[in-house]
Amino acid sequence: MHIVLHQPEIHYNAGNVGRTCVALGAKLWLVRPLGFRLDDKHLRRAGMDYWQHLDWEVVDDWRALCARLDEGRLWLFSKTAQRAYTEVRFEPKPVLVFGSESQGLPSGLLQAHADRCLRIPIHANARCLNLSVSVAVAAFEVRRQLQASDGCTPSEEAKAIAEAVPHAKHTTA
C-alpha cells in the first residue's frame, strides 16, 4: 500500500501519518511543496520512535509521483467526492492520495481522476476530518479488505509486514 500526502502543510499530521504507515507496512510519499522542513524535530517527534522504521520518499511534484507509481491504482480522497470509500473493492498495492489540510486536492487532479475519487462520509455538522485521521480510516479499510480477500489472519499479516519493512528506507528526489 502507498499513502500519498499531496503538499501537506502540518508536520504533526505528516508524522502521525508516518506512524500509521509503519503500523500498516505502507510506503509514505510526500509531494512538494511541503509546509514544513523534513528535518523538523516536530515531524520526527510526531512520529516518535517509529520514524526510523518508515519507508518514505519525497517527490517534487505530481508528475514525478505518477512516473514512479501506477496511476491505475490511484484513489483520491476528497470531501466533495460522490462515492464512499466503503463502496470500493480495493486491489493489492493501492495508492491512497490525500490533499493538503487547508485546500485538499487540486480540482484539476480530482477532475482528471473523477472515477477514482472517494469520500469518507461524516455528519453534516462536521466540516472535515483531520488529515491523519482520514488516512487511518481509509488505510485500515484497505487492510481489512485485503486481509479478508487473502484469507490471512491478523498475526500472519503482522509477521509479513515485519519481514517486508525490517528497517527504514528513505529517498528524496
Image (cartoon, rainbow, N blue to C red):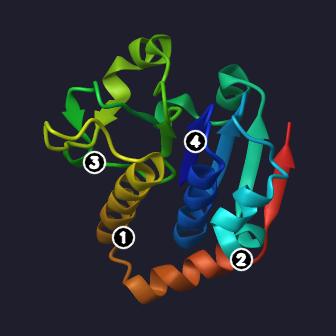
Viewer-side residue, 16 vs 112: 16
Q: How many other residues sit within 10 Å of disc 3, few (<14), some (14-19) or many (≥20)? A: few
- Name the disc covering residue 118, or none: none
Work out whether mark 1 precedes mark 3 in sequence or the reverse, and give the earlier one: 3
Of helix, strand and loop, which one carries label 3? loop
Which numbered tag is attached to residue 89? 3
In space, the residues marked 3 and 4 are separated at their CA atoms by: 19 Å
Amino acid type at mark 1: Gln
Q: Residue at x 46, y 28 (%)?
A: 104
Q: Residue at x 36, y 52 (%)?
A: 138
Q: State left or right for residue 91 relative to residue 127.
A: right
| Residue under the point 69% across and 35% down | 35
Question: Hey, what amino acid is under mark 4?
Answer: Val
Q: Which mark is residue 147?
A: 1
Residue type for callout 2: Asp
Q: Name the residue beneath numbered marker 2.
A: 49
- Crowding at dot 4, Cα within 10 Å, few <14 / some 14-19 / many 20+, comes out as many
Q: Is residue 14 above or below residue 173?
A: below
* Res. 30 visible in picture: yes
168 displayed left or right of 27: right
Q: Amino acid at mark 3?
A: Arg
Reading the chain from its start, which is encountered first: label 3 or label 4? 4
Percent x, y for residue 52? 78, 70
First in sequence: mark 1 vs mark 4:
4
Mark whose residue sits in front, 1 or 2 = 2
* Front tag of 2 and 3: 2
